[in-house]
Image (spheres, helix red, strand yellow):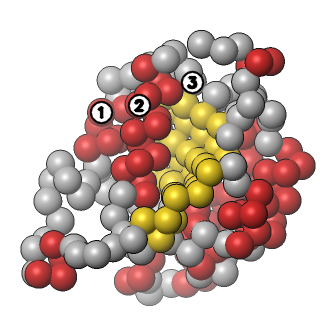
Amino acid sequence: MKTRNRRRGLVVVNTGEGKGKSSSAFGMVFRAAGWGMKVCVIQFIKGQWQTGEQKAAQHFDNIEWHALGDGFTWDTKNPEQDVKTSREIWEFSKQKILSEAYDVVVLDEINYCCGYQWISGREIADFIKNHKPAWLHLILTGRNAPAEVIEIADTVTEMTQRKHAYEQGIKAEQGIEF
């Protein structure tokens, strides 16, 4: 594995309407962990809802997982609380990035927060440009990635939905959707 002083940390954005944004990021989480890298996952939307990825991460000493959101925000009854929670998670995320304790940090679903205008894309992009350690890989997921973040990213993948089981009345399946 490359030492930090020889690594170019990438900014990766997974966005779009299709399935697979977080799943792709979690694939990178387990890949990095397999190489002995220290990984931190911070989820902005999902709260205490258990997922298979989070359960799998418990088997790795080098993956730290934080599901800090209030849950699915499209059902929100308290938008002010959602803004407050998102801002708190963003501050927590910045601390983790600046701590230099990690090789990879995933900001799962942060792009949704930008789409809801809870955190500005300019604020995120400026922080990344000015403060992200040069060797740190940073992965941001969620629909509605802001243009400012896309502009500074090294890799951007947009997932396109062609067909989804949910549209046919099929509910989320354990092991596939969560």
Instruction: Select label 3 or label 2 by which is in front.
Output: 2
Q: Is residue 91 above or below residue 131?
A: below
| Contact between labelled residues 2 and 1, with CB atoms less than 8 Å apart | yes
Cα distance, mark 3 to mark 2? 10 Å
- In this rendering, does residue 135 appear at all? yes
- SS class of the residue under badge 1? helix
Q: Position of residue 83 (x, y in %)?
A: 63, 75
Q: Which amino acid type is marked by label 1?
A: Ala
- Tell me how far mark 1 sits from mark 3, CA to CA: 15 Å
| Residue under pointer 2 | 30
State the image coordinates of residue 151 (x, y, percent, origin top left). 75, 63
- Of the residues shown, which amino acid type is indicated by label 2? Phe
* Label 3 crowd (10 A; few <14 / some 14-19 / many >=20): some
Image location (x, y in percent) of residue 23: 37, 50
Q: Position of residue 142 (x, y in %)?
A: 50, 65
Q: Which one is in front, 80 or 54? A: 54
Report the residue at 56% width, 21% height from top.
37
| Residue 70 appears in the picture as rendered | no
- Mark 3 lies on residue: 38
Q: Quadrant of the C terminus?
A: bottom left
Which residue type does callout 3 highlight?
Answer: Lys
Determine contact: label 1, label 3, CB under 8 Å.
no
Dot 1 or dot 2, earlier in sequence: 2
Is disc 1 surrounded by few (<14), some (14 to 19) or many (20+) residues within 10 Å? few
Q: Residue furthest right?
A: 130
**Secondary element at image label 2:** helix
Mark 3 or 2, nearer chain start? 2
Q: Is residue 156 above or below residue 86?
A: above
Element under label 3?
loop
